Amino acid sequence: MSKIRQILPKTREDKELLDGLRQGDNSVISYIYKTCYPSVSHLITGNKGTEDEAKDIFQEAVMVLYDKVTHENFELSSKLSTFLYAVCRRLWLKQLNKRQNSMGTSDSEGMEIADVESDIQIHIEKENEFAKMDSAMNQLGEPCQTILRDFYIKNKSMNEICEKFGYTNADNAKTQKYKCLQRLKKLFFDQKSDYQ
Amino acid sequence: MRQHEFLELADRYLTGQMSPQEREEFELLCNQDEQLNSLYVSHVDFIETMRRHEARAEFKNQLSETVKEQASEAIIIRMWKKLKINAVAAAAVAVFSSLATLYATGYFSTLRRANSDYSALKREINNVKRNVNAHQNAIKNINKENTTAQAPLQYGATGFMLTKDGYVVTNFHVVSGADSIHLQNNKGNTFKASIIYVDSEKDLAILHISDSSFTAQSANIPYTFKRQNIDLGEGIYTIGYPRDEAVYGEGYLSSSTGYSGDTTAYQISVPVNPGNSGGPVLDKSGNIIGIISGKQKGLDGAAFAIKTKALIETLNRIPEESLKGNIVLNNKNSLSNLPRTEQIKKLQDYIYMVKVY
């Protein structure tokens, strides 16, 4: 029995998959790709899309899912595959509309279409925020970027950073870190007002 | 307290570098000072945003890596997807056209006997003459519009009486497609006959003499019908009409099954020719054991006879309403003690040449 289980492709529970997504588990990503991508590809290539466009849409849909999963009050009301399919469909419709090609798509039958509009909205907001942070980080330049990353994200100690960047003492490094953070904040929040 | 120093404290607090005492002091500080507290909250918030951003970027990267990795998987699958419709259509056309060709060439209608080396033994009496006439007519009338009707194709075979009141059995392949059927006895009298029942599976046809000039014979038919299988090697004989005279043929039972293992027939080794179809096969004491139906091409002495048992089964299956009086088979054999030549003399009156137009 245990042997059979090893041989058979593992079907995973949605809950397990979501936890994996939250932690950025690579095997979960490829599992989702394998199980959900074919129907999406079918949908898009069957509706005036190419394989590459299908991949882009699929990636974006997974990002929508990721944003939903990492959002605080998270709740997945339908099956994961259904959700992804619905998101892809919605995204692709939007893209078609942009091309002023507003024709209905033909779905694979029997797929229940969840209401995904709000999820996509959240995703768009996150994407904006993400873009802002990205450009703020880029404008910040080196060595500030690395100092902040090392300290706040990789949780390195001030002493390590001090050695790495050749500061004479930890206090200098701390001052540098403070200045960098202030600059980043300024860049980030200034942009925010730009957008609004 | 300056912002710089406070944030340094906050960082230490967040990274857990403070001793419990320091932590308490820091918390107290935050609680007391509204401004510092909001500074702390916004700091934590911002750090959190940064972290989320980093994790998200990482995830996005991984995702696109995964998608790229999987991409190369499927060139063949993609091609198959694109060409699937074409392939299916091509296959459908191929199947359809081959079936249509087979149908058009009459493969299905002759499936049972054809592509085989089985040949039914009916005699095409005027076949050659008819073909020659047709050619001559065609040549004569080559410039004329209307062509004269051809003489209908005529077949000959054998049949024999089942009962004295006019039931006769022959092969189905003899009478299939017949316009009219005539039976001619050895004295040259001809009677018109009608088809009562045909069994195309067993290749049997039951006829009834419908001619008014036919009178039921006073004497019972001399032979009986033997339903049991007879043994290999048993001597048998037949009388038939491969030509316009009755022809006697003698041989033995060579196998208990017929063509390609058909259990409703025997294989017999008796010289038979086109026209022998429907002739009776008798054993040495004058019991009917079968009805000649055909032979195997290119194989010497392999003729086939339908077993009497199959004949009885067919008779039992005739619906009541199509009968003109019951078929009661004779069960008294008056041939058994006679020498062969006497048997034949008696038999001849009951064996007919079947002419089909």
Image (spheres, coloured by chain):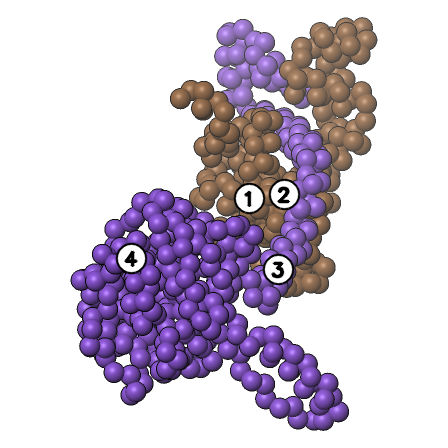
Chain colours: A brown, B purple
Residue A140 visible (yes or no): yes
Q: Amino acid at mark 2?
A: Phe
Q: Amino acid at mark 4?
A: Pro
Q: Give how far apart the Cα atoms at labels 3 and 1 are.
A: 46 Å
Q: Which one is in front, B201 or B219?
A: B219
Tag 1–tag 2 contact (CB < 8 Å): yes
Q: Which residue is mark 3?
A: B98
Q: Which residue is mark 1?
A: A84
Give the structural element (helix, strand or loop) at label 3. helix
In the rendered image, residue A125, in percent from the top left (x then y), is placed at 62, 44
Residue occupying the point 79% across, 28% down: A140
Q: Which residue is mark 4?
A: B339
Question: Circle 4 marks a residue in which chain?
Answer: B
Q: Which one is in front, B154 or A139?
A: B154
Please state which of the two labelled residues, at mark 2 or mark 3, is closer to the viewer.
3
Disc 4: CA contacts within 10 A as few (<14), some (14-19) or many (>=20): few
Please state which of the two labelled residues, at mark 4 or mark 3, is closer to the viewer.
4
In the rendered image, residue B117, in percent from the top left (x then y), is placed at 54, 55
